[in-house]
Image: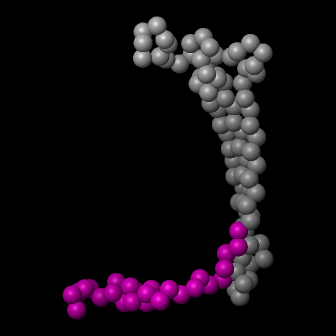
Amino acid sequence: MPMDQPSRYGYTKSANSQNRAINEISFRLQPGPFGKDAKYGAINFMGQYEYLSANPWYVATGAPKNAHDNTILLQPALYPARLPRLPWASSVALLSRNKDWTQ
């Protein structure tokens, strides 16, 4: 890079993507399963909230001084009562029980 061009962060007219500080806070709420049934499984629900704040080094005239973001994630999940049996799972279990694997 030539010596007459700035090569660090925070110089005049630098890009607003060069952030001086990024602050984030988030929390998650995941209560116990709802509708738990031995035959069908369980339904679970998770919620997450995030707040993000970014402050750039240089702010152009008329541009906002910082950026804020609020993100909410809601995610339902279904846990089946019984996972499907894999055809090779029983042979792996038998091998792991043997102390001598050469037999």
Identify the residue at image location x=53%, y=19%: 9
Q: Is residue 20 left or right of residue 103?
A: right
Can residue 21 be spotted in the picture?
Answer: no
Residue most extreme to the front: 2
Q: Which residue occupies the foreground of this view, 57 or 5?
A: 5
Percent of width and height locating residue 95: 33, 87
Residue placed at 76% from the left, 21% from the top?
64
Q: Where is residue 4 in the image (x, y as percent from the top left)?
A: 46, 7
Farthest residue, direction left = 102
Q: As displayed, is residue 73 above or below residue 50?
A: below
Nearer to the camera, 34 or 85:
85
| Vertical side of 76 occupied by 54: above or below | above
The chosen color scheme is: one colour
How far from the left and from the top, in percent, is residue 57? Answer: 61, 18
Asked if residue 24 is among those painted magenta in the image, a careful observer would answer no
Quadrant location, the N terminus = top left
The residue positioned 74% from the left and 45% from the top of the image is: 71
Relative horizontal placement of residue 33, taking residue 16 as reference (left or right): right
The answer to whether 57 is drawn above or below residue 89 in the figure is: above
Q: In which quarter of the image is residue 40?
A: bottom right
Residue 101 % position (x, y): 25, 85
Magenta-colored span:
77-103
In the displayed structure, does residue 50 sit left or right of residue 103? right
Q: How many marks?
A: 0
Q: Which residue corresponds to the image point at 72% horizontal and 76% vertical from the top-left?
A: 42
The image quadrant of residue 18 is top right
Is the C terminus in the top left, top right, bottom left or bottom right quadrant? Answer: bottom left
